Amino acid sequence: MQTNVNKRKDIKFAIVGLGGIGKTHAISAYMANMTLNLPYDFNLVKTVTRKPTDFFLSGTSNTQSLEEVLEDKSIDFIDVCTPNDSHVDIVRKAAEYKKPVYCEKPLSSSYNEAVAMADVVKKAGIVNAAALIYRFVPSINLIKNEIDEGTIGEIIDFKIKLYHKSYLNPNKKGVWRTSPSSGGGALLDLGIHLVDIVQFTLGNVEKVNCRNRIFFENRTSVDEISNCDLYLDNGIRGSLEVSRIFADSEESTSFVIYGTKGSIRMFSNKADSIEIYDYNNNVTYTKSSKGIDKILRYYGPSAAGFFYDSHKASLVNFANILLEINSDNNITPDFDEAVKAQRVVEACYKSSRENREVNISEI
């Protein structure tokens, strides 16, 4: 795709919090400008940090005042990338100023605070979204289409896994993600993506049975490994496994669904295609998203791998909501959707603590 030189407008935004994920959002926004034929440009005009930062982009200034950004009517939205426990206060202030909010997942370390955040943006009537970026991976949307079309028949089971290895590093000890209050464990940090994928493609989770585990007990107070059985309200059941200490050469997310007519599988390192096994004909074939505009419209040509490309697509879909562009095809998860996923995560934690099956209605 070529960049449209006749841009209709700039979408001005500010990033609040400029750690690793904040920089990822900034890069993804500028990738969208360069790789997609959009009727607008993302323009990062402000960054908000606790201390002055030396990370600068042309046209971007840094401030330590959130109010300065919220009072600036030329800024179209804020992008919240601070530690989880600070999200709620930032969102409440944004709601007071009627400023649209794009927020990194999870909404909060606390489920009750996440519910409060969804309530406050709804009452304020502001556009909102959470960065549950896996919804925008082409292979996930291909899976959704094939499930809706009944390609593999009645669903028997599914297995979804996400493994990271970064917390094998002993230097991670004491960082904010290892605290229950400021961060959260592997299940909340990574598993919320998987819960959202399951509910997006297969149906709503009704019941869970979960087992969480800490291996490096001297480094962290939050789960490093989580194994969960998920029971959906349509009768489908399957399993979710997530870890921040499982080492492999590639940190690939996998999703396999087994049905009466075959199976479907995806791997995040092959984000533009899925493998389908046809049981009746004993053949396996690859289905690609290439040429499917509905799926690729805002994902665009892969520039830096699925992680950045999915963040890019998520930000673009949010901007389209702000500008009321192609709203009929928009799959951006708002705060209500993010709470829906976090409710399942909260039930999983309760299940692990109490060593029993937990119904989502208990949360």
Image: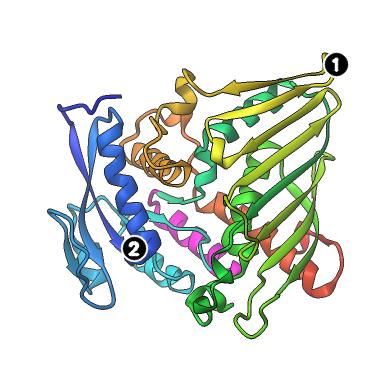
- Image coordinates of residue 363 in percent, x first then y, are 72, 64
Q: 205 left or right of 293?
A: right
Q: Residue at x 42, y 33 (%)?
A: 299
- Give whichever of 124, 73 is nearer the camera: 73
- Give whichever of 287, 197 is nearer the camera: 287
- Give whichever of 338, 177 is nearer the camera: 177
Please, is residue 30 above or below residue 217 in the view? above
- Taking the view exactly as shown, the residue that stands out farthest to the left is 59
Q: 235 left or right of 91?
A: right
- In magenta, the rendered stretch is 109-127
**At label 2, which amino acid type do we have?**
Ala
- Taking the view exactly as shown, the residue that stands out farthest to the front is 249
- Taking the view exactly as shown, the residue that stands out farthest to the top is 281
Q: 242 left or right of 32?
A: right
User: How does the figure colour the protein chain or chains?
Assistant: rainbow
What predominant SS class does the magenta segment belong to? helix
**For marks 1 and 2 on the same chain, the one whose residue lies earlier in the sequence:** 2
- Image coordinates of residue 282 in percent, x first then y, are 82, 18
Q: Residue at x 25, y 38 (%)?
A: 33
- Taking the view exactly as shown, the residue that stands out farthest to the bottom is 218
- Give whichever of 206, 296 is nearer the camera: 296
- Image coordinates of residue 191 in percent, x first then y, are 63, 57
Q: Quadrant of residue 256?
A: top right
Please say whether residue 164 is one of the residues in the magenta stretch.
Answer: no
Q: Which residue is mark 1?
A: 280
Q: Quadrant of residue 213?
A: bottom right
